[in-house]
Image (spheres, rainbow, N blue to C red):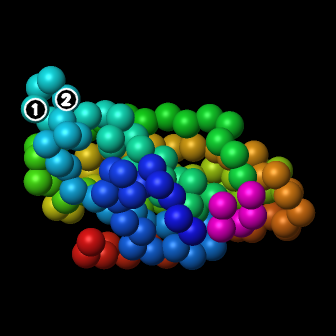
């Protein structure tokens, strides 16, 4: 699946499976804010990309709500990864937790819920994802 926005940001898909995804990128000079650290919008886009990929593995889905908490700054050249895992799946909605990590440290936490457009799947137990750290 081609995503021009991800391409423009230099993001790469590392892992994709039902209900989970991992996306990685590197903080470039054009991703920095006025403080010289990764812009929150870049980190959000990274997490949102993993969220979108993971949620759409179950069929077409669109975001209902999202939240992101930022914990530590990153500078230019930092490699960063977003790991999305499904925490709840029902017939009409699904919720995902996305950890944004760099060098083994949690940089930000994103949670998002989607509306499943098909809504024809059965309920699936939470915690069925299995994402191990991967090199980008």
Residue at left offset 36%, top offset 51%: 8
Residue 53 placement (x, y as % from top left): 56, 61
Give SS at disc 1.
Answer: loop
Q: Quadrant of residue 132?
A: bottom left
Residue 61 placement (x, y as % from top left): 72, 52
Q: Nearer the viewer, residue 126 or 57?
A: 57
In the rendered structure, are the residues bearing label 2 and label 1 in contact, judged by CB atoms less than 8 Å apart? yes
Quadrant location of the N terminus?
bottom right
Residue at left offset 82%, top offset 52%: 117
State left or right for residue 11 relative to residue 51.
left
Would you say residue 112 is visible in this rendering? yes
Q: Which residue is mark 2?
A: 33
Residue at left offset 32%, top offset 73%: 133
Give SS at disc 2.
Answer: loop
Total marks placed: 2
Quadrant location of the C terminus?
bottom left
Most frequent secondary structure within the magenta stretch: loop
Q: Quadrant of residue 72?
A: top left
- The CA span between labels 2 and 1 is 5 Å
Q: Is residue 10 magenta?
A: no
Magenta stretch, residue numbers: 56-60
Q: Nearer the viewer, residue 27 or 125?
A: 27
Residue 24 placement (x, y as % from top left): 32, 62
Q: Quadrant of residue 45?
A: top left
Q: Which mark is residue 36?
A: 1
Up/down of 123 relative to 74, above or below: below
Point out the residue furthest to the top here. Answer: 34
Up/down of 35 relative to 23, above or below: above
Residue at left offset 53%, top offset 65%: 2
């Amino acid at each position: 699946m081609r995503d021009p926005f991800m391409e423009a940001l230099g993001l790469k898909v590392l892992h994709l499976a039902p209900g989970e995804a991992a996306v990685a990128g590197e903080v470039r000079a054009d991703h920095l804010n006025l403080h010289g650290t990764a812009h929150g919008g870049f980190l959000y886009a990274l997490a949102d990309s993993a969220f979108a990929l993971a949620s759409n593995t179950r069929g077409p889905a669109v975001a209902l709500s999202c939240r992101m908490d930022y914990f530590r700054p990153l500078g230019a050249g930092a490699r960063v990864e977003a790991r999305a895992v499904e925490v709840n799946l029902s017939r009409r909605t699904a919720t995902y937790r996305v950890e944004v990590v760099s060098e083994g440290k949690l940089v930000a936490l994103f949670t998002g819920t989607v509306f499943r457009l098909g809504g024809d799947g059965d309920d699936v137990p939470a915690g069925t994802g299995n994402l191990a750290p991967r090199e980008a």
